Amino acid sequence: MDGVVDHLADERNKAQFDVEEMKIVWAGSRHVFELSDRIARLVASDPVFRKDNRATLSRKDLFKNTLRKAAHAWKRIIELRLSEEEASKLRFYVDEAAFTDLHWGMFVPAIKGQATEEQQQKWLPLAYKMQIIGCYAQTELGHGSNVQGLETTATFDPQTDEFDIHSPTLTSSKWWPGGLGKVSTHAVVYARLITDGQEHGVHGFIVQLRSLDDHLPLPGITIGDIGMKFGNGAYNTMDNGVTRNGKCVRSNVPRQLIYGTMVFVRQTIVSDASCALSRAVCIATRYSAVRRQFGSQNGGVETQVIDYKTQQNRLFPLLAAAYAFRFVGEWLKWLYTDVTQRLQANDFSTLPEAHACTAGLKSLTTTFTADAIEECRKLCGGHGYLCSSGLPELFAVYVPACTYEGDNVVLLLQVARFLMKTVSQLGSEKKPVGTTAYMGRVEHLMQCRCSVQKAEDWLNPNTILEAFEARTARMSVAVAQKLAQFANPEEGFLELSPNLVEASVAHCQLIVVSKFIEKLQQDIPGKGVKELLGMLCNIYALNILHKHLGDFLSTGSITPKQGSLANDQLRSLYSQVRPNAIALVDAFNYTDHYLGSVLGRYDGNVYPKLYEEAWKDPLNDSVVPDGYHEYIRPLLKNQLRNARL
Ligand SMILES: CCCCCCCCCC/C=C\CCCCCCCC(=O)SCCNC(=O)CCNC(=O)[C@H](O)C(C)(C)COP(=O)(O)OP(=O)(O)OC[C@H]1O[C@@H](n2cnc3c(N)ncnc32)[C@H](O)[C@@H]1OP(=O)(O)O
Ligand SMILES: Cc1cc2nc3c(=O)[nH]c(=O)nc-3n(C[C@H](O)[C@H](O)[C@H](O)COP(=O)(O)OP(=O)(O)OC[C@H]3O[C@@H](n4cnc5c(N)ncnc54)[C@H](O)[C@@H]3O)c2cc1C
């Protein structure tokens, strides 16, 4: 910040905690912090990675621009001999959805997780060196959620020792896979395996799509892009493909390993939610401290909008959620590592819980984050609607996360099945463990009473936990009892699906709250860091309690008076967090390049930069617009003539 006026300096001076230590907590470790910081600066200082007005580029220019950046990123990765961790951070900070996300995020993990040793030895070195580019081709025009309903077939031909991959209908065309449309040379294609005329369910097959010489589709394969998507720039940097297939190579793995890839990808999506959410919150918080409206006394300065309690009530729960999602993401990563080690040893016992946790938390965090980005846009008033705020593009890129890698409602229904199974096994030999261990105390949770008598009693983590556990246990048992009244359980499941989804949401919220509380039990160094995190944890939990008061009251988990005290405590927490708000978003350590927002600039110098940015719009290239002579001038002349008549 040398030589630059910091308009947010007063705000930064108010902080009551050690921001540098909080940066380490946010990053996860000093090593990750230092690595991220170095790579973020490297990307920000490279002119090729500049984010040149993506919103105003044509689809073709946008796409070519993305190819250019992806090629440059790879060049830098090779030149600088970056490690896998550094390379992945570099792609993250380049911040442009591209085929590489799918190559590294799905194609490589699918091979690692599902291919045999021999197949890995053949394909992984090629993929690691990007001598082939891969995508993940599961979804078809006719089926996405219903994986068992996929129509593409893979028929083994013993004569040629090959699989014949066939899309027999229009609806069996692979439709949506990222990177497939224009770039990928290979794909992991999901198809129904047929051998000796017998079906063996859906499996993944590595298929070469394009020639490695001239990039033309191989014989029998038709490929293209599926067309423009939501938002002008945004996700349109990505080619999403449609293809109908011919022949291929081979694979045959247990079904559970296919599941392992989905568990992995959903886990990364949860971590990504905390990134997208913190980015939007950083923009809205900094701008809320810069923006002033009303409240001027005797010609003095007006009130910073961040000081309005309504602004705090909308913004601070989002800030708290960013931290909450960060910590639950860390835990989920641990869970994934654990389940992977078990799968490798043929132990599938923890897979159902890992599936329920990743599916549920993917759903909870992406739904919340998509809504929160839009809320941040509104928190920035009119200027939030400008592309230069960074928020419209962030929303457009982010919102499909509610759909891809499993529609969020479909995923919550998976959690519901797991919950119902857990409830049905209560009282049997099989004791609930892990995230459902609380169900083991169901008798207590069905009748316990919340002890809160005054607002501060809500600061006790055990009180919060028990209220959340009681709410979830009671909702789950109530819906299980209703289900039991149906002669046909599947019919009951369909009929009661809205209640089941609500119970699943409650269960997932409980996981996030409990993982935040567990985080606070760790040794966290730095002046005031733990205290601030404690406040954020309480805001996260009490805001949910306030927003879902109906659940807590209807299950009798708390009384109306206790609900009202929780809200009083929330307001008090907002006042305590307020002086720390800017420092709490500084702890994300985002560069201005990554934020891509005039409103969220580190130095808070918003107005001159907004003005400058506006003049860069191509519409301002000429003072008199194109079309004046054709459409405006004749109109004005006609009006003149009419007026004279
Ligand atoms: C690229 C990496 C992502 C990085 C994120 C960061 C992003 C940053 C920038 C963003 C920019 C670009 C990135 C773009 C990324 C886009 C990626 C998108 C990729 C895709 O969308 S790929 C397609 C994904 N498709 C789905 O997820 C389909 C959803 N459907 C299903 O998962 C399932 O079929 C189901 C609905 C869950 C189940 O259906 P069904 O009832 O038919 O059940 P099954 O017969 O299949 O199963 C029965 C049995 O199995 C259990 N089970 C199901 N799934 C799993 C699992 N995953 N793991 C473990 N167990 C599973 C199920 O519970 C049943 O058990 P039971 O018999 O009851 O005991
Ligand atoms: C940007 C983007 C990128 C993608 N990338 C890839 C990729 O790389 N590879 C790939 O293979 N796929 C990809 N997809 C596809 C994606 O995985 C699917 O779109 C997703 O799984 C949802 O499936 P669907 O489209 O069939 O939705 P549908 O299942 O048709 O959903 C439509 C509606 O029906 C509801 N619904 C469906 N089933 C049920 C049920 N059982 N009970 C209650 N309600 C139900 C849903 O909640 C939703 O409201 C991508 C999609 C997008 C948007």
Image (spheres, rainbow, N blue to C red):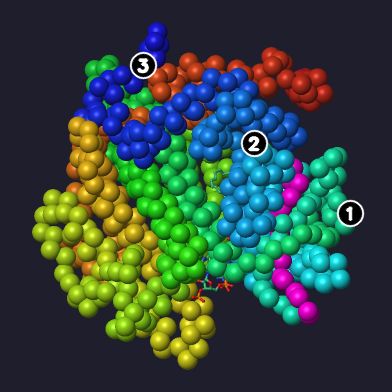
Above-or-below relation of 190 to 613: below
Percent from the top left, x then y, of residue 591? Answer: 46, 26
| Amino acid type, residue under disc 2 in the picture | Gly
Q: Dividing the image into 4 quarters, which one contains the N terminus?
A: top left
Residue 233 bears which disc, if any?
2
Between discs 2 and 3, the one toward the N terminus: 3
| Amino acid type, residue under disc 3 in the picture | Asp
Residue shown at 32% from the left, 41% from the top:
316
Q: Farthest left residue?
A: 453
Between discs 3 and 1, the one toward the N terminus: 3
Instruction: Note whether ligand 1 is within 8 Å of mark 3.
Output: no
Report which residue position mark 3 lands on.
6
Name the one closer to the observer, 205 or 46: 205
Residue 219 bears which disc, if any?
1
Marks 2 and 1: in contact by CB < 8 Å?
no
Q: Dividing the image into 4 quarters, which one contains the C terminus?
A: top right
Q: Nearer the viewer, mark 1 or mark 2?
A: 1
Q: Nearer the viewer, mark 3 or mark 1?
A: 1
Residue shown at 86% from the left, 51% from the top:
218
Magenta stretch encompasses residue 295: no
Percent from the top left, x then y, of residue 333? Answer: 42, 52
Above-or-below relation of 311 to 633: below
Local SS, label 2: loop
249 left or right of 299 in image: right
Above-or-below relation of 231 to 155: above
Label 3 and label 1: CA atoms lie apart by 61 Å
